[in-house]
Structure formats: C-alpha cells, structure tokens
Amino acid sequence: MLKILKYSFFDLMRSRWSYVYFVFYLALGFVLLFLNNDLNKAVITLMNIIIVLTPLIGTIFGVMYYYNSKEFTELLLAQPIKRKNIFMGQYVGIALSLTLSLVLGLGLPFVLYGLFRSTAIFDFILLLVAGSFLNFIFVALSYNIALSTDNKIKGFGYAILMWLFLAVIYDGIFLISLLMFNEYPLDKFSLIATMFNPIDLSRILILLKLDISALLGYTGAVFRNFFGTSFGMVVSMFILALWVILPVFRMNAKLKKKDF
Amino acid sequence: MIEFKKLHKKFGKLIVLDGLDLHIAKGGIFAVLGPNGSGKTTLIKSLLGMVIPNKGDIFFNGKSVLKKWDYRNDLNYLPQIANFPPNLTVIELINMVKNLRPKKANEKELIELFGLQGFLQKKLGTLSGGTKQKVNLVLTFMFDSELIILDEPTTGLDPIALIHLKDLIQKEKDKGKTILITTHIMSVVDELADEIVFLLDGKIYFKGSIDALKKQTNNTNLERAIANLISKQYA
C-alpha cells in the first residue's frame, strides 16, 4: 500500500493542479493578512473559505483522479497486490497531497507574519486540522461515489450534488426546520443535526474556538456548553474521524464485489 | 495449467459467461477469439481477479484464484487500453512496476527492441497511442512468468513494432511458456496460434488447432473460417 501511496502522491504533487491549489492558498493567506492586518480576523475569513472550498476541491480531485487513473488502476489490479491496498494507497495519496497544499499554502504566510508569537496559533491549528479532516472526508465520499458509478459524467454530477447538498442545501433545510419548529426546544435537534454534516460540524467547532459564539444567540450558548468543553471537542473530533472511517469502510466493502 | 469450471458471469441482465468450462494446458500459444461482446475480455479478467464471477471456479496451477492475489506474480498481463498516469515519466513508470513485483526484470533489452530510449524521460501524458502501447508491452514482457496474457496486443503498433512483437511472442513460446492472446487480427492468429478457443454466447464454441477449424468449417482461409463461425450468431 505504501508504494501505491508514494506514487499517487508524487503523481499528484507533480500535477499542475496541485500547484494551482497551493499557490491559491498561498495568495489567499498573504492577501488576507495584508487586508486584515490582524491574525485573528484573517483566521475567521479564512474559515469561511476553507469550510466550503476544501470539500469542493476534495470532491473534484477525488472523482477526477479515480476516473482518470482507471486504466492505470487496471494495470495495478493485474499485479500481485491486494485490491484494498491499491485503492487505500490512492485514497491516502490524494487526501495527503491536498492536505499538504493546504497546510503549506496557508502555513507559510501565517508563519512569516508571526504566527508563533500570536495567540491565534491554536485557532489556526484547529482551522488546519478541520481543513485536513474535510479533505480526507470528501475524498473518501467522492471515491465512494466514483466506485459506485461507472459513468464518468454521472459520477461527477453526483459528487458535485453531494458537495452542494452538504455545503449549501443542508443548511437551508436546517434553517427552515428551525423556523418551522421554533416553538419547540430545538437545541438537542440542532446539536445532532450538526453532527450529521461534517461541514457544519467543522464550522461550529472553529467558531466556538474563536470565541465569537455570542453571535450565535441562545443556540450558541447551548453549543458553547457542549463544544466548548474538552469533552465536546473530543466528541466532535471523534465524529469527524467517524466521517472518514465509515466511507472508507464502505469503499472496502464495495471493492470486494466490484468488477473492473 | 488453467482450469475454468462452470464459470457464470452476469452484468445486470446480460449474461456474458454461461457455465463456461475450459482447460488450458501448459505451453503454447492460445488465441481466444469470438465476436464483439462474446466475453473474451471478461474471461481473461476473471482469471486476473478483476472481474468476480457469479458462480464457478478458476484454478491456476491447481489452486483456486478467487479472492487470492499472490498468484498474479506468476503471470504477466497486457491490458487492452494503455493509459498511464500522465505526470510520471516512462522510466519512472517502469521502475514503479518493477518495484511492485518481487521479480527480476529485463527491461533494458525491450526498451532497445522497441526503440524507446529517447522516450524514457518523457512524461507519459505526452506520448502517442502507439508509443504508449510499446511502453505497455515493455511492462508486460519484462518479467519472466510462466503465463502471459495479451489483450489486443497489436493496437496502434507500426509494422516494425508488430514484427518485433511477433518475434517476442514466438521466443517466449519457445521457452515453454503459456500465452493467451485475444485479437481480431487474423494474420496474427494464423502466424502464431497453436490452438484456437472460440467463444460464443458465453460458452466455448470451438477449441482446437487451426487445421481442425478449417476442416470443420470447410474453409481453407482462416479469416473465412472464423467468419463462418461468427455468422452462426447472426443467423
């Protein structure tokens, strides 16, 4: 598996898109710091971008890599390697190279700006951790979709829909249901509904860490009570990890029966 | 050497292999023929473990291959379409495949044979279809395995490369290896094959030497004899 990982990783690290992605984050980091002139504010703006963008890029890279390397995967399948190892290697290779682009692209400007002397360092690290989780989650989800859909166009469509649903539509439904049922106590419901969407979960996690939960009103206080504690933090991290593990699990189950 | 037993495979409603039985002895060149969609590639891919049969079993050197992977170290496979990671160079790809298999490789000889020396540092994405097929051939033939499976090996090759390929196949046969070829180019079959396996409707319709086939169909020309077999499907 490590060999496949190594080659997928190097293959991606050498592709133009990894550079574009890296340079984009690099530019974003510098511009935000230049405009905000404040690490804390830059982290907030960055969060809004990362929370939507990393899932999108992860999704697109995942399906694109799967379909583009289909014939090559077939070549690998004919080699004396376990099926599972081929796909796990590819999956980790993609997720890791995207994570590297994210961490280096954003890390560089922030470190140059004096991150290590700032109090924002923990917020920033949490931001990167959440971003990395989102990479692993969405590459896994998109690989699931690609494995289940042989038609490239359909696979792409489903993957984008999945992203759109989790990044935008889910929040819409969530908000509407909050409005519809605002006569009932909703804090438990909203807490649980957040868990079912990794994008929301990371957003809340970072917002609360940034200590701007006052903006969130009453529900914010409930969230604060839950996520603000180290217990909440552990639970959310656990759920984010679950969001990685379950799709990976399904991927392996699917692989056992798949024809190439 | 290879034994397919009551092999069934369905893709949705389409039955591709319908209780196929086939025994392939060690040594010699076997041409797997049949009309488009007759299950040639499916048959080969089930042997490779890429397609998982619904029923039946496959034995390679007396051992079942289903759900196994290490037996693949004893066979070389040339896939139908050569498409590689565009960002790797030719030499990197060759080294990678070498790295994946615990076996000695003689890629240098083959690189020379197919005139690929000038392409080694080029990225795979920039190569033409024929050159990619040559790289594909190098990857297949560089290992010394007792079974070689070639799926449409002639695609995109120029006449010189084709001659080299034929010589190469002949040479491997002389070493006592078993070679499975699928192709639609009858001249290749005529020139190389010791035995023909003809697939139709998911079963073995004919298995035997070229002469036997010609006799059975009353044709002296192989191409016509094969066409005669296929036309039965259209009738």
Image (cartoon, rainbow, N blue to C red):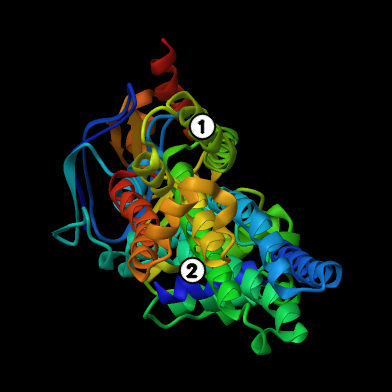
**Residue at x-position 57% and y-position 43%:** A167
Q: Quadrant of residue B9?
A: top left
Q: Nearer the viewer, residue A109 or B35?
A: A109
State which chain disc 1 sits on: B
Query: For the residue carrying disc 2, how many other residues have a C-alpha within 10 Å: few (<14), some (14-19), or many (20+)?
Result: many
Numbered label tally: 2
> Where residue B190 sits: x, y (%)?
48, 44
User: Disc 1 designates what residue?
Assistant: B223
Residue type for callout 2: Phe
Mark number, residue A204 = none
Going by the picture, which residue comes out furthest to the bottom? A117
Residue type for callout 1: Glu
Side of B210 where B139 appears, left or right: right
Q: Disc 2 and disc 1: Cα gap in Å?
A: 28 Å
State the SS at label 2. Answer: helix
Work out which quarter of the rendered image holds the C terminus of chain B and state it: top left
**Residue at x-position 36% and y-position 63%:** A232
**Residue at x-position 48% and y-position 71%:** A5
> Where residue A258 sits: x, y (%)?
34, 44
> Where residue A168 sits: x, y (%)?
59, 38
Marks 2, 1 in one chain: yes
When the figure is inspected, residue B79 is found, relative to residue B124, above or below; the finding is: above
Looking at marks 2 and 1 on the same chain, the residue that comes earlier in the sequence is marked by: 2
State the SS at label 1. Answer: helix
User: Disc 2 designates what residue?
Assistant: B141
Residue A121 seen in this snapshot: yes
**Residue at x-position 46% and y-position 56%:** A137
State which chain disc 2 sits on: B
